[in-house]
Amino acid sequence: MQDFAHLFSDSVAAWLRGRGDFRFQRYERHYRADRSAAHEAASFDLERTNEQYAVRCRRKDGRLVAVLDTRAFRHLVAFVAILWGGSLLLPTVGKSQPVAAGVVLIGIFIAIRIKRRKANSSGRSQTVAR
């Protein structure tokens, strides 16, 4: 059977070779620490160690990843992008067609207001119905 590990960067063989992503080194530190804590070879359980490592890796997503994955952060990024684009576009359009820019802005504000009012009224009716 041939080893196709060179084709798959995330294969077990590539992981064991390291490939510069430090996963193997992190696992090796965990393994050595658990083995030294067991003191004797008879009390060391490799399966238990591997399960603990898997739990530790799942739990340790990182604070930055957790923050970036929140709904509030996604809304903030969208708001900043729209604000930045609008700040570049509005002065240009406002100079050439000030009335049209004003009408568009008023329309946007009214649409936002209507959307929020509908969301609030539907939220109230759902809580009353339950």
Image: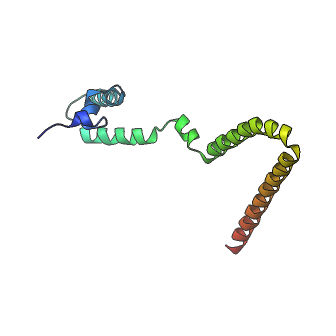
Residue drawn at (62%, 44%) of the image: 74
**Residue lying furthest right:** 99
**Residue 23 appears at what percent x and percent y?**
35, 31
Q: Residue at horizontal 39%, vertical 42%? A: 55
- Rendered image coloring scheme: rainbow
Residue in front for this viewpoint, 111 or 32: 111
Query: Is 111 positioned to the left or the right of 16 in the image?
Result: right
Q: Is residue 48 above or below residue 37?
A: below
**Residue at the bottom extreme, as displayed:** 129
The quadrant where residue 11 appears:
top left
76 displayed left or right of 20:
right
- Residue at position x 61%, y 48% from top? 71
Where residue 13 sits in the image (x, y, percent)? 23, 34
| Position of residue 63 in the picture relative to residue 30 (left or right) | right
- Compared across the picture, whether 55 is left or right of 107 comes to left
Q: Quadrant of residue 73?
A: top right
For the residue pair 7 and 26, the one nearer the viewer reads as: 7
- Residue 121, given in percent of the width and then of the height, sits at 76, 66
